[in-house]
Amino acid sequence: MEPHPIRLVVMDDLRRSRLTVFFRLLLLIPHVIWLLLWSIAAFFASIANWVVVLVTGTASLDLHRFLSAFVRYSTHVYAYGFLAANPYPGFTGSPGYPIDVQIDPPARQGRLGAAFRLILAVPPLILTAVLVGTASWNATGERGGYDASYSAGSTGSFSALGLAIVVAFLGWFACLARGRMPQGFRDLEAYSLRYAAQTYGYLFLLTDRYPDSDPSWPEPAPAPAPPAITLHPDGDDLRRSRVSVFFRLLLTFPHFVWLLLWSVAAFFAVVLNWFAVVFTGRAPDALHRFLTAYVRYDVHVFAYLFLVANPFPGFTGAAGSYPVEVAIAPPERQSRWTAAFRLFLAFPALLVTSSFNSVLVLVGVGGWFSSLATGRMPAGLRNLGAYSLRYAAQTDGYLFLLTGRYPYSGPAQLPAPLEDEPEEPPLAPLAA
Amino acid sequence: MTTARRRAVGALALAFLAAVYAVGVVLLWRSSIPGGLDLPNLDAREYFGAAELEKARDYQRFVRVNFILTQVALLFVLGFYAVFGPRFARESAAGRIGTGMLLGMIGLAFLWLAQLPFGLAQLWWERRHGISHMGYGRWVLENWLGLGGAFLFICLAILIVMALAGPLREWWWLAGAPAFVGLALLFAFLFPYLIPGVHPVRDQALLAEAKELAAQQGLEDIRVEKQDVRELTSAPNAEAVGLGPSQRVILWDTLLDGRFAKDEVRVVLAHEIGHLSRNHIWKSVAWYALFALPGAYLIARATRRRGGVYTPAAIPLALFVLVVLELLALPLQNGITRHLEAEADWLALETAREPEAAERLFVRLGTTSLSDPRPPTWSYLLMQTHPTLIQRIAMAEAWKIRAGHASP
């Protein structure tokens, strides 16, 4: 696949200064003010750029440079705010920041797409809001927009923190405790920032290439340790039956009923498993098998509901029965201490899962329209949905004591070999 | 066993079954309506104004055409689905029974889509005549949620049928029919708890009246509730629902909004209590039981060439056969419900002893619901679940004559 004209370059070493992390929000104040002023200028510049593209079919070089610097600068600021990078960013959006954006020079763009750019950009703007902003719905059902400062209206009957904000909140504690940002968190932030940069690049007519929501492209950094629970949507060919898509929610009703019944049994199985692991350090085979099937079935049902997969799933959670396949490692020894406090330890992962769920709902809604129109699920959305489901499955597996390994939040798809983390990780640039 | 002997045993079993059915029909058809009761031949124009009659006929004409078109669309869509539906099996990773469930649900989904325009047309017509106040969006949403309920039901039904077809293969119907009767009983029991917007009646006078009428009909006590439907319709209605501890009478609030006199409400109450005192819900389930066995057998027979309901590919055809059988049984089914309704009417006359109020009620029901007092025969057979208004008025007249003869 041809590289996207807007790319994120990650040169971050994960180390964080505890002092600046502690005061990170306060340190951001000058940047927020400057970003606000710059946003006003960018607003008018983007209108001018829109007119230029409509007339000439290509963005003006000066405007392109200005808006590229704005997108780069806002990415630096948010990377800093979200703890995805450590150094204090400059105020000019110059290249070279550890989380940086590369933007190709202006190229010809379709005038029709440019004319309707604001409308076409609405779906990625909504997804960006869910990834890095604050999504909200007010009482009349209107959806709060997403503004240049990555935040939207906070009043309403429903509001959800963006995935990146939740991860930054949790990362703040991790950085203070360890002086390092967990790699999974950093990679997730990098993915969110990449998507936001591509969205704004698209909105400002820096490119006519649609933002790519695929977390598996380009290949993200491998996980530092092989996860015990992995998910592979490889069996899915992206084709969707329009009839079953149209009625997808209702078709899932029987599964909801069965899942509910199964959940009751799973609850007691988890309690028994907890006692078993706390006393023996290992999950009994029978319970592990039962809960593994439950987690797998849960993933099958939600993969079906949110169009991550097409076929109607079976009711048994059998391995190998579904295109979105969950692989769960066999029972392994676990620390009794972490098992004893598993509910509390799982809390951060549950928080992240709840944000991933918002992403998943959006994947389902976006995929619904797209699948009805084209009969296919966009690969990017499908993979983002699979990513969300994978994290949820890992959280379930950890909470249910199927594994002692903490959920890995990075977008890396394949398990990497278990290796000791080097003291000083090499600063190889990573495209995200 | 020789073929001749096998045939003889089969014929004997069939004769025994026919005898059981005959006894069942005779027992279930028994009624409190006196034998040989002559209903006077009345002229609708004596009770309804010419304008009212014309309005009701005009209204019902559209309803009938819409009904016919709905049935045609339904048969066409399901026929088409019976042929092409099995290809949806490739949309499933759910195994034999799960795939059957999916095919059943998709069949219902097509059915829903096919009926949607006719349902909307009916709503438009009802709104135009002031019978319904429901918004189109709400109607579609409620229908859509109803489809979700139907999905659950069909899944349960297919689960039973296909699970039985596992060990029993083509003989599944022998166990399937009793299982469905059990389900019908369960549903009849649970139904009162599924009705939305139901509250206990607070009117002590009405409750006392219900108690008195129940006592007259041999019931110890009766639960009376009110359902809020005013926002959706202006049509009055009432129903008797539930089995055993769940049984109750539900009156729509449109019946209690002051348009109907107390003696008219008393007649309605007596009618609904009549359903409960004569065990009409039990009888309905028993009638269903009589239909269920041959119905299940015919479905098993019709789907045999597709491997029977053991194979998911047979489910679309089974759905089609089921709907065709239901359509064929409709005149019979309506005949049975009309019979039960007539008995409830008679009991209402016997216990409320308000024939004038009953006549006024039926006339008013005609004008508020725009019912045709004398519908065409085909419509009477296919669409009429209650006796016609003129038949109901005639029964009140007959009761008056009979009571006049009986009174000293």
Image: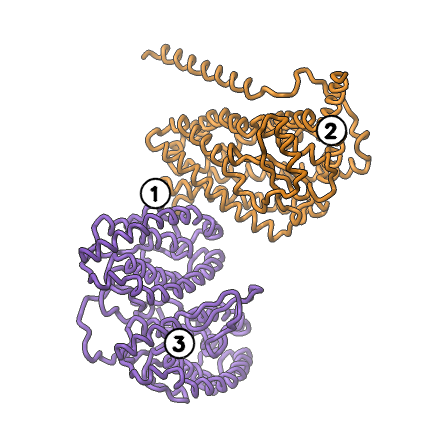
Mark 1 or 2: in front is 2
Q: Mark 1, chain letter?
A: B
Please tell me whether mark 1 or mark 3 is closer to you in this view: 1
* Residue at image point 72% right, 27% down: B353
Residues behind callouts 1 and 2 on a single chain: yes
Residue at 75% across, 22% down: B400
Which label was assigned to residue A5? 3
Upstream in sequence: badge 1 or badge 2: 1
Give the numbered dot on residue B354: 2
Q: Is residue B242 above or below residue A2?
A: above
What hue does chain A carry in this figure? purple
**Is any atom of residue B58 visible in this view?**
no
Between the residue at mark 1 and the residue at mark 2, the CA separation in whole angstroms equals: 61 Å
Report x, y in % for residue B107.
Answer: 48, 42
Question: Which sits in the foreground, A129 or A355?
Answer: A355
Q: How far apart are marks 1 and 3 (CA)?
A: 45 Å
